[in-house]
Image (cartoon, rainbow, N blue to C red):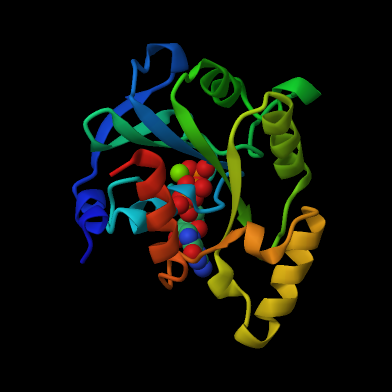
Amino acid sequence: MSAFHKILRETKHYKTEVDPLLLGESDVEVSFVGRSNVGKSSLINALCQKKNMARASQVPGKTRTINVYEVVRRRWIVDLPGYGYAVGLKTEKDKLGKIIEDYLHARKNLAMVFVIVDAVAGPTQLDHLMLNWLQHYNLPFSIVVGKIDKIKIPKLDERKRQVAEELSLNVNDLLWVSSEKNIGIAGFQKVIAQLLQI
Ligand code: GTP
Ligand code: MG
């Protein structure tokens, strides 16, 4: 096992916060966004080889907090609330959620925002809104397509092409993963290790 695998396994829950302005400072952090239930917390668990560190939600959209996981001191993986399940009347500008937007505006040492997209649903309108928003504010982002185990193997290449095309990207510009079947996780760990410089 290489050094960064071991280090990722030492990741611990560090804090839960509702106000992004109270998070304190990191030296470097990467964060996970995506629609509710897309598998953000499961992916963080898979990356850190944990069963239940990041709580996989029972009820979608219930996570209204920012959860910080510390890989090593001041190097963080941040799990953000999911978007798309918000209740009540929402204006266009509120759709992604104030917590998410405030967080993204506030962080000085944000090395990457991973936008998680569902392999079956493909990029939703809100995913496109999120991506446009990140581009507009010039924030670093990468797109990760999750739950690829739900696509049957013979259909997978075709599905990859479709999803990439919907995002106007090449298949190789995206990360393709399954937390459940541990597909693509090793490659994703390497990306995170490089960003967090572990
Ligand atoms: P919120 O916190 O509500 O935003 O959800 P989340 O994005 O953190 O999703 P979570 O990790 O809680 O997973 C949601 C559901 O998807 C759970 O029932 C998981 O078991 C399931 N799930 C997560 N990853 C995968 C995967 O790779 N494959 C399959 N088939 N199911 C998955
Ligand atoms: Mg979650």
Quarter that holds the C terminus: top left
Q: Is residue 150 above or below residue 15?
A: below
Indicate the position of residue 39 as horizontal and vertical percent values.
50, 53
**In terms of depth relative to the viewer, which is nearer, 133 or 181?**
133
Q: Look at 59% across and 40% down and name the residue there.
A: 141
- State the image coordinates of residue 150 (x, y, percent, origin top left): 58, 73
Q: Please tell me which residue lies in front, 52 or 59.
A: 52
The image quadrant where one finds ligand 2 is: top left
Residue located 51% across and 64% down the image: 177
Left or right: where 114 falls relative to 7: right
Residue 164: x and y in percent read 74, 61
Which quadrant of the figure contains the N terminus? Answer: bottom left
As drawn, is 169 to the left or to the right of 74? right
Picture layout, residue 91 above or below residue 43: above
Q: Residue at x 43, y 20 (%)?
A: 18
Q: Give residue 147's position: percent from left, percent from top.
A: 55, 65
Q: Is residue 191 visible?
A: yes
The image quadrant of residue 115 is top right
Question: Can see residue 19?
Answer: no
| Residue ranking furthest to the top | 21
Q: Is residue 25 above or below residue 31?
A: above
